[in-house]
Amino acid sequence: MTRIPGRLAVASLATHRLIVAVPNTGPAEVASNLPRTAAADMLRRLADHLDSPAGRCETARLTGHPCPLHDAPTAPRPADPYEGDLDLDVDALLAGLADHLAAEAAAPTSSTGPDPEGDLDAGTVRDALAFNDDEHDQALATLRDVLLDTSLSRTPDQALAAARIILAAHAQQLAALVEAEHRATRTRYGLNRSTRGLLTGYSNARRTLHTYADHLAAEQARAEEQTAP
């Protein structure tokens, strides 16, 4: 017959600093938002507390001896087939977890960099472009930031999306430069037989760059529609 607990508790790292879960079968799990060395020290202190005969009340903690009131021997309860020597099991578990956390804290860090904190999604790249709007070369500054930010994980699809967004912005920048040259040339020399071919070339180049940027934007929009929930 399956045993049903009399009370259920829900805990998360939003309300607890250290959570240890011990299932009936399988390995124990530990979660903590403390530094690993601090978590290991706390687990050791918990193990020492369980191993000590004192500690059930303030009197025992102050004297170091069992309290005659709270630590008095109690009548043995019926054996539970689902539990062994719980104190010894938890004591060994906490000591083992403490040693494991301490060993991980002492181990050299990986050369692959810090653990990713998020994804390099399209919104992140667009935010970077907006942030670099005042830069002399917006696309170049954004490419620099994306390449340097190793805190974000990236899949091949996310990297392709970032490339589309940045290259589209770069193409629009180039189109604006061509338009500025077209305007400056026409203002300085006017439209005549000598300048007509040059101005037409500027117009064609600008149109080609806009078309390329629009093509990249359309491809990215289709990709985002396919991955939308």
Image (tube, rainbow, N blue to C red):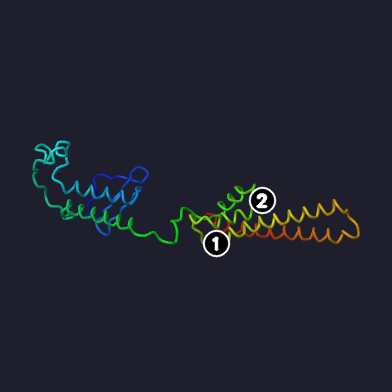
Q: Give the CA separation, mark 2 to mark 1.
A: 29 Å
Residue 184 is situated, as x and y percent measured from the top left of the image, at 81, 52
User: Element at badge 1?
Assistant: helix
Name which residue type carries label 1.
Answer: Asp
Residue receiving disc 2: 136
Q: Determine the residue positioned at 34% across, 59% down.
A: 107
Left or right position of 139 against 203 = left
Q: Determine the residue positioned at 30% across, 49% down.
A: 39
Left or right position of 17 against 55 = right
Q: Determine the residue positioned at 28% across, 57% down.
A: 100
Q: Nearer the viewer, mark 2 or mark 1?
A: 2
> Answer yes or no: do the residues labelled 2 and 1 have beta carbons within 8 Å?
no
Residue 49 is situated, as x and y percent measured from the top left of the image, at 19, 46
Instruction: List the single residue furthest toward the bottom.
Output: 156
Q: Crowdedness of circle 1 by 10 Å Cα count: few (<14), some, many (20+)?
A: few
Residue 99 is situated, as x and y percent measured from the top left of the image, at 26, 56
Left or right position of 64 against 34 = left
Q: Which mark is residue 134?
A: none
Which of disc 1 and disc 2 is earlier in sequence? 2
Residue receiving disc 1: 157
Instruction: List the single residue furthest toward the right.
Output: 193
The quarter of the displayed image where residue 23 is located: bottom left
User: Element at badge 2?
Assistant: loop
Name which residue type carries label 2.
Answer: His
Q: Is residue 50 above or below residue 140?
A: above
Q: Crowdedness of circle 2 by 10 Å Cα count: few (<14), some, many (20+)?
A: few
Q: Is residue 37 above or below residue 66?
A: below
The quarter of the displayed image where residue 219 is located: bottom right
Q: 17 or 188, which is in the foreground?
A: 188
Residue 126 is situated, as x and y percent measured from the top left of the image, at 59, 51
